[in-house]
Amino acid sequence: MATEPSDRTIVLHLLRGAVPERADEISGLWSKYGHAVEVTPSTKGVTMNADASRIKFDTKTIDFFWLLGFSVWRAIEVYSPALLLATATATPLDQALGVDAERGQYEFDYRQRIASAQSLIAAEQTADIVWPADVPQPTADRGGLRDDQHKAVFDLVAFALAFALLHEFRHVMFYADSSAPSTLPEEEIACDTWAREFMTTGLAAYATAHGHSYAQVQQKRAMGIALGAVIIHAMTPTHAHWGSRQYPPIAERLTAMISGYSLPAGSSFWPFTACLLIALMRQENRPLDIVANSNQEMVEILLDRLR
């Protein structure tokens, strides 16, 4: 009788699947460091951390990645009309948002979704919240999802979760090697940077071998990491957004994850990420008197404004 794979093996398979061109490398590192993967009972708050000997998380935190990912996806339908108007006509973004007469109800529904997802953080376990009827239950079976949009979100959530787990694995490496940066905020940024580079370097050969363009593969990975950045923002308590002895300002982490991609101006990454950032700015009641001539410029200005 076949035995069920261990949690450690399941996480390794997730990472190998997310970054297949580096599958052998991550397997080698997994073997070298010999750390455990501990799935702990769910409790209030968020559980995802690491030390020299283990990565620890609970299933409720994984469910949060899923639920918030599916909820945040709706930012596209809420903000893309105003984004298109603003960038096409050099209209200030706040004015473009005001012109979109249908945005109000869409935005209200969006905020309800985000609030529902965030309520999962305060819950003891996933069963304590009302799961939205139009969001599929978390599953590892992508093929079982009938909706193409659900499959697209599945892929991005998988990349976002892989990013977060690679971030934690870098902590394991730092602690085991006694090579961590001198401060905890520096270590957090270093883990973000390493996870991003692990997922986005060496893509050319993989893309060619599978009949994709380099830009297509990089775009999808970058979108998944941008989604991960927004999920990490939601997991970070409001009082810690400006930084602490343990964590850097959340805007610095967002910048480390999102900025600097050499994607074409027409890449879907730019409007997707712009909509995510507009949603964050709207949630925090930040001014949006921004004039940008392209989606890429909009992303760059929004990141700067978040600081």
Image (cartoon, rainbow, N blue to C red):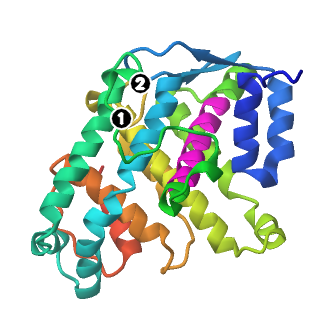
Locate residue 216: give its quadrant: bottom right
- Crowding at mark 2 (Cα within 10 Å: few <14, some 14-19, many 20+): some
* Residue in the image at 10% along x and 70% along y: 98
User: Are discs 2 and 1 less than 8 Å apart at CB?
Assistant: yes
Q: Which mark is residue 165?
A: none
Number of numbered discs present? 2
Q: Position of residue 26 (x, y in %)?
A: 79, 40
Give the residue type that dot 1 points to: Trp
Magenta: main secondary structure: helix
Q: Tell me which numbered mark, 2 or 1, is placed earlier along the sequence.
A: 2
**Above/below status of 254 relative to 55:** below
Distance from Cα at disc 2 to Cα at disc 1:
8 Å
Magenta span: 153-170
Going by the image, does 290 lie left or right of 99?
right
Q: Position of residue 285 (x, y in %)?
A: 15, 50
Q: Position of residue 45 (x, y in %)?
A: 38, 20
Indicate whether residue 100 is drawn in magenta.
no
Give the residue type that dot 2 points to: Thr
- Crowding at mark 1 (Cα within 10 Å: few <14, some 14-19, many 20+): some
For label 1, the residue is: 131
> In front: 97, or 117?
117
Which quarter of the rendering shows the N terminus? top right
**Above/below status of 282 relative to 4:** below
> In front: 61, or 132?
132
Q: Which mark is residue 126?
A: 2
Farthest residue toward the bottom? 89
> In front: 138, or 238?
138
Q: Dot 1 lies on which element? A: loop
